[in-house]
């Protein structure tokens, strides 16, 4: 059995180097849909991190008792129960935000990050490392969400958390909001830019070219 | 009839699952590398969504909705908070059954789809379709049309993206943009294109 990586490495790995959104391509659906404003992005990030840590803990605690054949259904049932609890909490105390998040809290159930981490890490590790790993992945996801949410709200409406940062032209300021930032395509473009920036800083994350040009002068 | 046709077109283009609601993006990006697998995934999506959305609608109205138990003298029971577990259970069951049926009666289709079928259990677009159905209070026929339309919309989007990506295999891209980055840019541009359909949908 290979030695376990230290808890600090388990925690730091998924923050930037193995970021679930930009490197593992997991959980992109919700990362884009809820980022039109910063407060929904933060709510979503916190909900996902809590669900991830709790379900990793539960799956890891009962990992020796789950029969292999039905493990997917067991894990999904655990995750879905956690999501229902979070959904009820949001509806009870943060009703405004829960209305704006609409179905996306429910969709944490099928967020690939949650199932991916319980399936690949929590199922083979004791509760403490499993929870640390889940926390690291949750925070890595949160970082991407908050960056994109902040950019979209700042340039789309001139506000952060609903407070005016850039005074709008129509209210006597100088800033004309970019309507594109409030629409769906901008999320794709921003995420593409983020991935590009990250991979320029960390070149070893770049994917190999799909075809290699032939070694003739015309091929270059 | 007119309404149903409108609903179908609306679910297919105006409210396209991956491009305007960002649902099912994981498989949308991961399986659009080759055209054949993209088409297979699209067909599977049409089948699974066409089955699960109306079935979930039946389950919701018969068991979960507030007041569904009034025939048993229990009108105050509201089980709607259990909808996630019920829906995901039904989706997992449907996917499993579809896989077994295909394996038995159409082995060649099963062989070409084999890997993707189990993945559909955790496809956000499928669960999302059922959740939207509850939010918008569709009846069973509307749910069937909505499910088929969303599935068809997903199939079109993923096939188009795959076709563009095949052409891009020979493009000389900056290293950081290869693979995931350029796919996001492409999806963004397709999403801009699909945004123009919302003008059509406007009354």
Image (cartoon, rainbow, N blue to C red):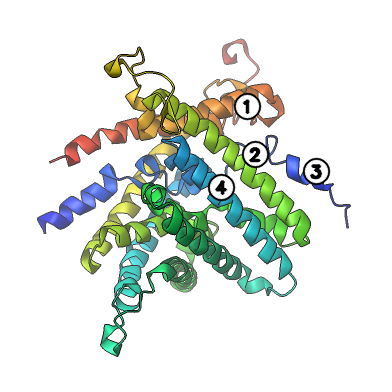
Q: What residue appears at the point 60 percent right and 50 percent down from the top-left corner?
A: A49
Residue A176, horizontal then vertical, whole percent: 33, 17
Mark 3 vs mark 2: give the one in front: 3
Badge 3 is on which residue?
A8
Closer to us: A148 or B95: A148
Q: What element does badge 2 sit on?
A: loop
Distance from Cα at disc 4 to Cα at disc 3 = 21 Å
Q: Quadrant of residue A180?
A: top left
* Cβ–Cβ under 8 Å for marks 4 and 3: no
Q: Earlier in the sequence, mark 3 or mark 2?
A: 3
Mark 1 vs mark 2: tell me if same chain.
yes
Distance from Cα at disc 1 to Cα at disc 2 = 10 Å
Badge 1 is on which residue?
A198
Q: Is residue B165 visible?
A: yes
Q: Residues within 10 Å of mark 4 (few under 14, many from 20)?
A: some
* Cβ–Cβ under 8 Å for marks 1 and 2: yes
Badge 2 is on which residue?
A19
């Amino acid at each position: 059995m290979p030695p376990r990586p230290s808890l600090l490495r388990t925690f730091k790995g998924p923050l930037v180097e193995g970021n679930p959104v930009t490197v593992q391509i997991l959980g992109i659906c919700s990362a884009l849909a809820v980022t039109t404003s910063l407060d929904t992005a933060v709510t979503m990030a916190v909900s996902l991190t809590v669900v991830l840590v709790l379900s990793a803990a539960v799956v890891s605690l009962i990992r020796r008792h789950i029969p292999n054949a039905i493990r997917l259904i067991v894990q999904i049932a655990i995750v879905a129960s956690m999501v229902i609890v979070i959904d009820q909490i949001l509806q009870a105390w943060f009703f405004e935000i829960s209305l704006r998040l609409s179905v996306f809290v429910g969709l944490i159930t099928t967020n690939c990050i949650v199932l991916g981490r319980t399936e690949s890490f929590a199922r083979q590790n004791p509760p403490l490392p499993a929870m640390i790993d889940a926390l690291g992945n949750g925070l890595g996801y949160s970082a991407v969400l908050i960056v994109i949410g902040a950019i979209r709200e700042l340039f789309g409406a001139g506000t952060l958390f609903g407070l005016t940062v850039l005074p709008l032209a129509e209210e006597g300021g100088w800033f004309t909001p970019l309507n594109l930032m409030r629409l769906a395509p901008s999320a794709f473009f921003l995420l593409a830019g983020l991935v590009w920036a990250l991979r320029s800083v960390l070149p070893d994350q770049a994917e190999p070219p799909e075809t290699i040009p032939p070694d003739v002068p015309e091929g270059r | 009839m007119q309404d149903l046709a409108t609903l179908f077109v609306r679910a297919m283009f105006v409210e396209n699952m991956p491009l305007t609601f960002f649902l099912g993006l994981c498989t949308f990006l991961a399986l659009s590398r080759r055209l054949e697998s993209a088409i297979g995934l699209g067909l599977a999506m049409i089948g699974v969504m066409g089955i699960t959305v109306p079935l979930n609608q039946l389950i919701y109205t018969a068991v979960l909705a507030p007041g569904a138990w009034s025939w048993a003298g229990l009108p105050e029971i509201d089980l709607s908070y259990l909808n996630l577990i019920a829906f995901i259970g039904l989706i997992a069951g449907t996917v499993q059954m579809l896989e077994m049926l295909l394996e038995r009666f159409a082995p060649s289709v099963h062989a070409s789809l084999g890997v993707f079928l189990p993945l559909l259990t955790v496809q956000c677009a499928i669960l999302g379709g059922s959740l939207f159905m509850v939010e918008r209070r569709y009846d069973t026929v509307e749910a069937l049309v909505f499910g088929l339309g969303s599935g068809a919309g997903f199939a079109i989007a993923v096939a188009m993206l795959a076709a563009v990506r095949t052409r891009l295999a020979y493009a000389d891209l900056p290293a950081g943009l290869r693979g995931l980055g350029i796919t996001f840019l492409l999806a963004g541009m397709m999403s801009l294109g699909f945004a123009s359909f919302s003008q059509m949908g406007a009354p």
